[in-house]
Image (tube, rainbow, N blue to C red):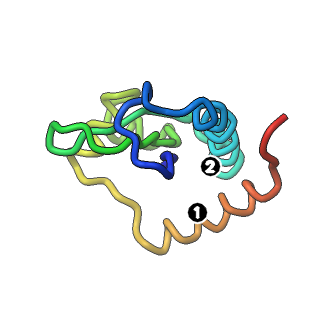
């Protein structure tokens, strides 16, 4: 998940500096996810609602892997919704291991051009 540090509810509320930093950051995170997970695609989706009320911008960076598409017989937003409905969440150990791999991949990349 990538989100602004400052509380922001709408993309239109981002400052010019926040907007300028967001694109390269999302690209770096998606590149790290691609390198580590090697998915079919990396989804980058904007979510900001909690209980039907805008809350805080959250860009979900999700690897879409063939095994999940097959398991849920879905892709794109339908895959995300099927996973949400089932409560499909990785275990703590899996999250920690993946986080370490992603940190390493991100440390090898640089910000900016």
- Residue name at image x 37 percent, y 31 percent: 10
The foreground one among 105 and 74 is 105
Quickly name the residue at label 2: 37
Question: Which residue is labeled 1 in the image?
Answer: 98
Q: Are marks 2 and 1 in contact (CB under 8 Å)?
A: yes
Q: Nearer the viewer, residue 27 or 91?
A: 27
User: In the displayed structure, would residue 93 be above or below residue 16?
Assistant: below
* Residue shown at the point (74%, 62%) measured from the top left: 104
Residue at position x 53%, y 71% from top? Answer: 96
Tell whether 28 sits left or right of 8: right
CA separation in Å, label 2 and label 1:
9 Å
- Residue 73 in view (yes/no): yes
Q: Quadrant of the C terminus?
A: top right
Q: Which mark is residue 10?
A: none
Query: How far from the left and from the top, in percent, is residue 62?
Result: 49, 42
Please state the horizontal and vertical placement of residue 66, each as a whole percent of the image. Answer: 50, 37
Q: Is residue 106 left or right of residue 66?
A: right
Q: Secondary structure at mark 2?
A: helix
Instruction: Report how many numbered discs are placed on residues in the image.
Output: 2
Residue 45 percent location from the top left of the image: 44, 33
């Amino acid at each position: 998940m990538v989100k602004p540090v400052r509380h922001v509810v709408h993309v239109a509320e981002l400052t010019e500096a926040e907007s300028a930093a967001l694109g390269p950051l999302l690209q770096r995170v998606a590149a790290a996810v691609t390198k580590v997970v090697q998915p079919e695609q990396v989804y980058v989706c904007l979510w900001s609602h909690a209980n039907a009320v805008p809350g805080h911008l959250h860009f979900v960076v999700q690897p879409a892997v063939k095994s999940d598409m097959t398991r849920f017989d879905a892709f794109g937003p339908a895959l995300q919704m099927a996973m949400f409905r089932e409560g499909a969440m990785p275990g703590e150990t899996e999250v920690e291991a993946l986080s370490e791999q992603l940190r390493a991949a991100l440390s090898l990349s640089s910000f900016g051009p």
